[in-house]
Image (cartoon, helix red, strand yellow):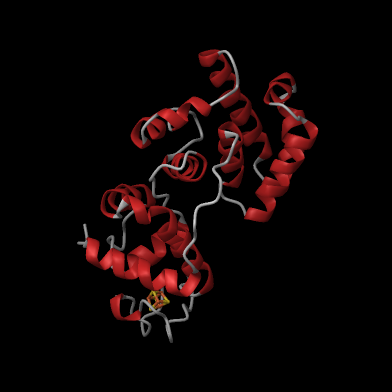
Amino acid sequence: MARISEARIRRVDGLLAAEYGDRPRGDAEPDVVGALVRTVLSQNTSGANSSQAYRRLREAFPTWEDVLAATDAEVAEAIRPAGLAEIRAPRIRRILAEIRAAHGTVDLSWLRSRTCAESTAYLTGFVGVGAKTAACVVLFALGLPAFPVDTHVLRVAKRLGWVDPLCRAEEAQAVLERCVPDALKYRLHLNLVMHGRRRCRPLRPRCGGCPLRRFCRYDESKGGA
Ligand code: SF4
């Protein structure tokens, strides 16, 4: 595994904050179950599609009990814009049913009093909730210091030499959760995603003028990821 120093992480964080902003935390998502469902819908699709699917779901079924009372087909129809609706609908309904069976109500606000590790372990116990999905809920809805590694974060982390070139997202997440100081996790995650979208793109990254260039191991002459 590549070496990664805290000093280097702090330097990169500062440079990205200067480029993309300080990213103060907003209010935590009030509905943790909603955050979980929204994140499940966001897997492998665009933000616009998953937002539309979530909005349609809440319009068709205003409460989580309504989703449980509906059929898989009805829920699939509501979330169709997210894609894979026939797989996601029973998954979401199963998650909701398991929460209700375990706690008597479809509510996860009690996770706010748990640690980052406890919340992550609980969430990844659901089918269809992997490390990245759990970390998104923990970071954004619970306000705890997880560090989700999506495709953008992974690509930039590889190019910076923070993780090995063949490292998978889950391994990278474990490394970065350990190495990134808790106080930086929210901002650095958001700014790495922004950097990956705007400049450090999969093909033909815009390396000229990149604030991270002096720290980067990406070889423009060879191209590739
Ligand atoms: S120098 Fe290029 S490859 Fe390296 S972080 Fe910047 S945009 Fe990405």
Inspect this view and state whether residue 201 appears: no
Query: Looking at the rendering, which quadrant does residue 8 occupy?
Result: bottom left
Residue 79 visible here: yes
In percent of width and height, residue 89 lies at 66, 32
Which quadrant would the N terminus be assigned to in this image? bottom left
Residue at position x 42%, y 49% in the image? 148
Q: Position of residue 179 (x, y in %)?
A: 26, 54
Residue at 56% from the left image edge and 36% from the top image edge: 36
Ligand 1 position by quadrant = bottom left
In the image: residue 123, left or right of residue 38? left
Quarter the C terminus occupies? bottom left
Residue 110 % position (x, y): 48, 25
Seen from the viewer's position, the closer of residues 161 and 166 is 161
What residue is shown at x 57% (from left), y 13% (from top)? 104
- Residue at 40% in and 35% down: 120
Q: Is residue 4 above or below residue 132?
A: below
Q: Is residue 54 left or right of residue 91?
A: right
Q: Nearer the viewer, residue 84 or 217?
A: 217
Residue 44 pos. (x, y %): 56, 50
Location of residue 78 with respect to 22 vertically, above or below: above
